[in-house]
Image: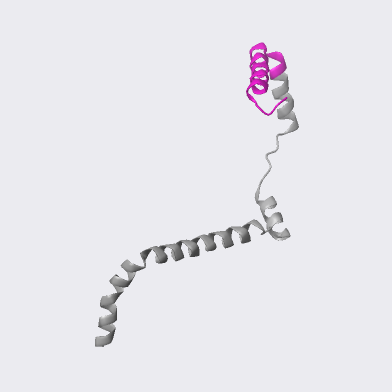
Amino acid sequence: MNKYKDKLILLPIFIKQHIVLICFVLFGLTYSFLIFTSSSQASKSPTDAEITERLQASKITKIDDSAAEALQQLIDNNDKIQALFDAAEIDNDRKNPFSE
């Protein structure tokens, strides 16, 4: 029991003498772990079951044809609304840096 106590007393001295090496090893292990996990995640592709599950989970919003026609008639009949849509199209073209 006494020899373990002596070794435990020497532990802080050992750490102070080799702190740079200990930090370097810990940094290297952490960096290696991060590289390994990111490379394994980057090469991972979803299975067909996961793809179909996600596609079924996402619901596509559908507009009734009669509602779409009613909205289009309102847009065509009202000049103020038509001006707003035209202004939005102009602003959208001007503010979009990816449009040519």
Where residue 11 appears, as percent x and y from the top left, is 30, 74
Using residue 87 as the reference point, say whether residue 15 is left or right of it.
left
Residue 12, compared with residue 56, is above or below; it is below
Identify which residue is drawn at 66% across, 45% down. Answer: 59
Image quadrant occupied by the C terminus: top right
Identify which residue is drawn at 62% across, 59% down. Answer: 39
Question: Hey, which quadrant is residue 40 in on the image?
Answer: bottom right
Q: Camera-side residue: 52 or 9?
A: 9
Identify which residue is drawn at 71% across, 55% down. Answer: 52
Identify which residue is drawn at 73% across, 59% down. Answer: 48
| Magenta run includes residue 52 | no
Work out which residue is located at the far bottom of the displayed protein and give it.
1
Where residue 38 appears, as percent x and y from the top left, is 59, 58
Q: Camera-side residue: 37 or 63?
A: 37
Where residue 77 appears, as percent x and y from the top left, is 71, 14
| Magenta run includes residue 92 | yes
- Magenta segment, principal secondary structure? helix
Q: Camera-side residue: 76 or 49?
A: 49
Using residue 51 as the reference point, say whether residue 19 is left or right of it.
left
Image quadrant occupied by the N terminus: bottom left
Residue 55, compared with residue 10, is above or below; it is above
Colouring: one colour
Question: Hey, which quadrant is residue 26 in on the image?
Answer: bottom left
Where residue 44 appears, as percent x and y from the top left, is 66, 59
Q: Camera-side residue: 22 or 32?
A: 22
Magenta-colored span: 75-100
Residue 5, compared with residue 14, is above or below; it is below
